Amino acid sequence: MEWHGTHELPKLVEYQTEATRVRFGSGVARTTVAGEVDRFNAQRVLFISTRRDAATTNVVARQLGSRLAAMFQDVRPHVPIEVVTDVRQIAEAREVDLILAVGGGSSVGTAKAVALKTGVPVMAVPTTYAGSEMTAVWGITDRRQKTTGVDPVVQPRTVLYDPDLTLKMPRHLSAVSGLNAVAHGVEAFWAPRRNPASSALAEESLRALATGLPAIMRDPASVSARSEALMGSWLAGMAFASAGSGIHHKICHVLGGTFDLPHAETHAVVLPHVLEFQASSVPNSASRIASALGADNALTGLKRLYDDLSIRTGLRDLGLADQDLVEATSLVLDKIPASNPRPVEREGMEALLRAAWAGTSAIRMETLQ
Ligand code: NAD
């Protein structure tokens, strides 16, 4: 890092955005889908979602009327290559001209993977806080290896954020998915392409998430709490899209892709340990994170948020075996960006993963002072 001002930015900043149309508000998924499909001039829409969320997502599908050319509801986590092949065949056979993904990051990710192979545009209606709809990042898992890449063709051209679709999301899923968004916001401060815009978006996203998520724990059906959290996830997704993937995302990709750990839970478990590892190397960013979380210290603020959300798990609770930590360390070390603000060596990474394996209580208390 060569510039130690309030922003801790690289010497040369690059900033690029992809054009996405966003509509945000209670009811947009119920009332505006047909009009938004018109804007694509689309006649043959492929609808992607999960069967278990049909009660929520079919409200959107029904608005397509005769333009619903095909439905795929067998989305699986981490976008397995077999699923991508199946959906691509459907897209080609039905000659679809728009893909509409309604659901969490797995549904949006499946739509992106099909767009990557076919070039068909994507419209997304997210129902979790994963944030994939804001990025041009795709990910496909093939034989325990998750490959990711960036291609503007996968970036959803239109995104409808409707908090009403999230009102029935259970508390625990809301908490871990929300912490996935918090991870986007926190990591944006040290990710390779960080820039003044991504840091500003990240800070504001954390402020909204730190308000919205605890409010959801108190009242999951509150439209205002859901709106606050969804707005936070939107901004966090933009920050992540702009700043790119850093150490935290690299760790989570390995744990998800190779060890099949659940995406949002893994982000939630790993984040405090990565923040503890990084914070002293990015003091100005840490103080911006702290202020957004309403605390004097970033880690204390994050711990308080975790307490409010009742999240106290470790990677061992998610199914990672003790003996997997050595392989995980090697795989992660291969992926750490050279621009990480502090050097990452085997010993430090293994200690980080071991602490995350044991759980949040493994965070050293002196770093919270
Ligand atoms: P997910 O899409 O698998 O959803 C998690 C669970 O939530 C599922 O069981 C789903 O049925 C349920 N669900 C979804 N919406 C719901 C709602 N409103 N109410 C109740 N239940 C609901 O998981 P996710 O955490 O949303 O996304 C994870 C995936 O997204 C991973 O594959 C990850 O790699 C990808 N992702 C990609 C990016 C990117 O930029 N490319 C960013 C974030 C996440």
Image: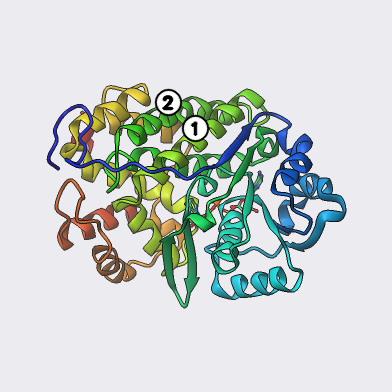
Location of residue 68 by image quarter: bottom right
Q: Residue furthest bottom?
A: 143
Q: Quadrant of residue 183?
A: top left
**Residue at point 49%, 67% (across, down):** 140
Residue ranking furthest to the right: 66
Position of the C terminus, as image quadrant, is top left
Foreground of the two, 303 or 26? 26
- Residue occupied by mark 2: 207
Q: Position of residue 82 (x, y in %)?
A: 59, 76
Choose the circle earlier in sequence order: 1 or 2. Answer: 2
Q: Is mark 1 within 8 Å of ligand 1?
A: no
- Whether the residues at callouts 1 and 2 have beta carbons within 8 Å, the answer is yes
The residues bearing labels 1 and 2 have C-alpha atoms spaced at a distance of 8 Å
Name which residue type carries label 2: Arg
Q: Nearer the viewer, residue 21 or 163?
A: 21
Mark 2 residue crowding within 10 angstroms, few (<14) / some (14–19) / many (20+)? many
234 relative to 265, above or below: above
Is residue 362 visible in the rendered structure shown here?
no
- The residue drawn where x is 86% and y is 50% is 65
Can you identify the residue that label 1 sits on?
A: 232
Helix, strand or loop at disc 1? helix
Q: Amino acid at mark 1?
A: Gly
- Colour scheme in the image? rainbow
Q: Which mark is residue 351?
A: none
Locate residue 272 relative to residue 142 in the image: left or right: left
Q: Could you say where residue 224 lies in the image, as x and y percent from the top left?
A: 62, 23
Label 2 sits on a secondary structure element that is helix
Residue 85: quadrant of the picture: bottom right
Closer to the camera in the image, 132 or 100: 100
Which of 360/2 is in front? 2
